[in-house]
Image (tube, grey):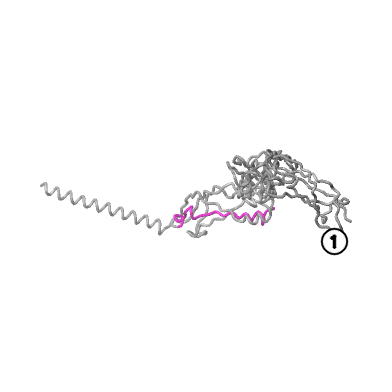
Amino acid sequence: MNKMNEKKNKAEKSKRSLYIVFSIIASIAIWMYVAYVQNPDKSIPISNISVVYVGEDALEANNLIVTNRDTSTLSLTFSGKRNTITKLDSSEITATVDLSAIVDKYTATAGVYQLPYTLDYGGTVMASSVSVSNTSKNYVSVTVERLVKNAVPVSVKNSIVPAEGYVLEDEELSFETLEISGPQSVVSSVAGAVAEITREDVEKTISEDVPLTLVDENGAVVESEYLSLAQETVTVTIPVLMQKEVMLYVDYIDAVSANGTDAVADILPESIILKGDPDILSGIDRLSVGTVDLVSFATDYRNIFDITIPAGMTNMSDRTTATVNVTLPGLSTKKISVEDIAVSGTPAGQQANVLSSKVDVMLRGTADALEQITAEDIRVVADLASPNGEANAYNARVTLNGSYTVDVIGTYTVRVELN
C-alpha cells in the first residue's frame, strides 16, 4: 500500500513541474510577442545630456564673447517604439546650441539670449523615430558681453634677497605692456600684470620667464576664464652685482737707493667701494691709483691722482681722487758743490767758456753711503746740444764715478758762453 502511494506522489510532482515550465515558456512567448511583434510606444526619461555650444568664432568676429551659459546638461523624456527607445543612452546624445544665431538672426549686441538646441543621437537611432515629450528646458540662456582689448603695464614683484656682499640692479623686462582681451566688465577691472619672483642668497644675475598675474588697482588678483593674454610669461632679468671694498695703492719706479719696499705711502682715502660683475670684481682686491718715480724726489712726495676704475665697474664712494704722500724713512740727503764742470757737444769752430763756477748737487742715500762720496766722485757735464731756453743756459748730466747706492736728485743747469 505504501509503495502505491509513493508512486502516486511522484507522478503528481512530475505533472506540477511540467506545468511550471510550460507557464514560464508561455509567459516569455507572450512578452516577446507584445514587445517585438506588437512593439508598443514607450516613454523614458534621460538625464545628463551634454550641451555643446558652437559658433563662438562668429561672435568673436563681431567683438562679442559669451560670459555665462545657464546649463551644461539637459534632462529630457523621449517617446517612441519600445525597441527604439531602449537604444537611447545619455552618453550618445548631445544638444547643440549654435551661438552664431546671435549674429545671423539677432542684433549682434551684448545681452541675454534664449537659444534653441538641436539633438544628435550619435547614430544610435534615427531622429525621426523618437520625439521629445517632456523637457526640463525648451531653450538655453546665454549672456553675451562686448569683447574688448586693452594694454596694461607689466611690473615685477621682487622678493629676491642677494647674498652678503651683493646688490640688485633694476629689473629689465622683455616687454613693459601686455595686451589682454575679454569681456568689457572684466577687462576694465584689470589695472596691470605682475611677475612675482622670489630667491634667497643670490650671487649671479637672474634671467628667466616668469608667469604673469593680472591684478586690479588694489593689487587683488583678477581671474576669469574668459580673459586672454597676448603672452602668459615675461622674461625678467635682474642684474646681481658684487659690491666690495678695494684697497688703494701706488706703483713705484725703483731708484738706486730705494725701491717699493723702502717707500711708505699714505693714501687718502685708503679704499673705495666698487660695484660690478662678480666674475671680474671677485679677482680685484686692490687698485693702483698711479705710479711714483722714486728718483723724482728727495725723501718726501705728495701728489693727487685721479682714481681710475676698471671698465664695467662703478665707484660707489664719494671720492674720485686720491691724495698720495710717500716718504723714504732711513734715507738722507747731502748737498755737494762740484766745481769741476765739463762740456760736451761744442759746435765746430767755437770755444766753450763755462760761466758757472760750481753746481750744487743733491744726493740721496743712507748716511753711510753718502759719507763715502766727495766732489771728486761726481761728474757734471754741460750738454751744449740741450739748451734749456734761457740765454747761455744748458742742461747738465750729473753722474757718479763708481758704484754707489746713491741717487742724484733733481735737474741741473750750467751757464756756458760760446765764442
Q: Is residue 349 visible?
A: yes
In this rendered view, identify the residue nearer to me: 278 or 110. Answer: 278
When asked about the image quadrant of residue 57, the answer is: bottom right
Residue type pointed to by label 1: Ala
Query: In the current view of this chain or complex, which residue is farthest to the left?
Result: 1
The percent coordinates of residue 47 (x first, y second) are 50, 49
Secondary structure at badge 1 equals: loop
- Residue 166 in percent (x, y) is at 62, 42
Q: Does the stretch in magenta take in 241? A: no
Residue nearest the viewer, comparing 165 with 76 = 165
For label 1, the residue is: 348
**Residue 245's image quarter?**
top right
Q: Position of residue 162 (x, y in %)?
A: 61, 41
Residue 184 visible, this angle: no
Coordinates of residue 22 in the picture (x, y in percent):
28, 54
Quarter holding the C terminus is bottom right
Q: Which residues are magenta?
A: 84-107
